[in-house]
Amino acid sequence: MVRTPLTPEERERGERLGLLLREARGGRSMTEVAANAGISAETLRKIETGRAPTPAFFTVAALAAALGLSMDELIGQCAPVVEAAA
């Protein structure tokens, strides 16, 4: 199966998601948060650094729950930035 290359917008959204998760993690260790979400620390590392810019929905939901974030908050902060027409 060949995967379609990600668009620059998808990569940027993945970077915003990673930054938001990293900030929400705060002083907690990557290992602790990953364990609470039921994923590996390496998966969390890839998401936080943007190397996995399109994680599965249930992975994001588990991370949001482990970090006390709402899915609405994640969507609001990770949605593409829409510029107003001139």
Image (cartoon, helix red, strand yellow):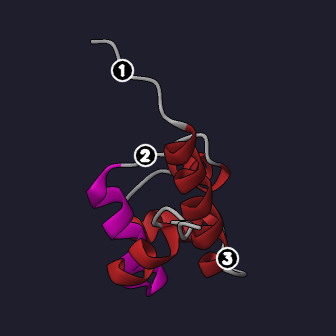
Magenta span has 26? no
Which mark is in front, 2 or 3?
Answer: 2
Helix, strand or loop status at disc 1: loop
The amino acid pointed to by label 1 is Arg
Q: CA distance from mark 2 to mark 1?
A: 12 Å
> What residue span does the magenta drawing correspond to?
56-70
Identity of the residue drawn at 38% across and 62% down: 60
Q: Earlier in the sequence, mark 2 or mark 1?
A: 1
Magenta span has 66? yes
Q: Is the residue 56 above or below the residue 70 in the image?
A: above
The percent coordinates of residue 62 (x first, y second) are: 34, 68
Q: Earlier in the sequence, mark 3 or mark 1?
A: 1
> Which residue occupies the foreground of this view, 31 or 13?
13
The amino acid pointed to by label 2 is Thr
The amino acid pointed to by label 3 is Glu
Residue carrying label 2: 54
Q: Residue 3: which disc?
A: 1
Q: Give the total number of marks visible in the rendering.
A: 3
User: Would you call the spot at circle 2 few (<14 residues within 10 Å), some (14-19), or many (20 or more)?
Assistant: some
Residue 37's quadrant in the figure? bottom left
Residue carrying label 3: 23
Identity of the residue drawn at 72% across and 81% down: 27
Cβ–Cβ under 8 Å for marks 3 and 1: no
> Which residue occupies the foreground of this view, 33 or 85?
85
Identity of the residue drawn at 60% across and 80% down: 24
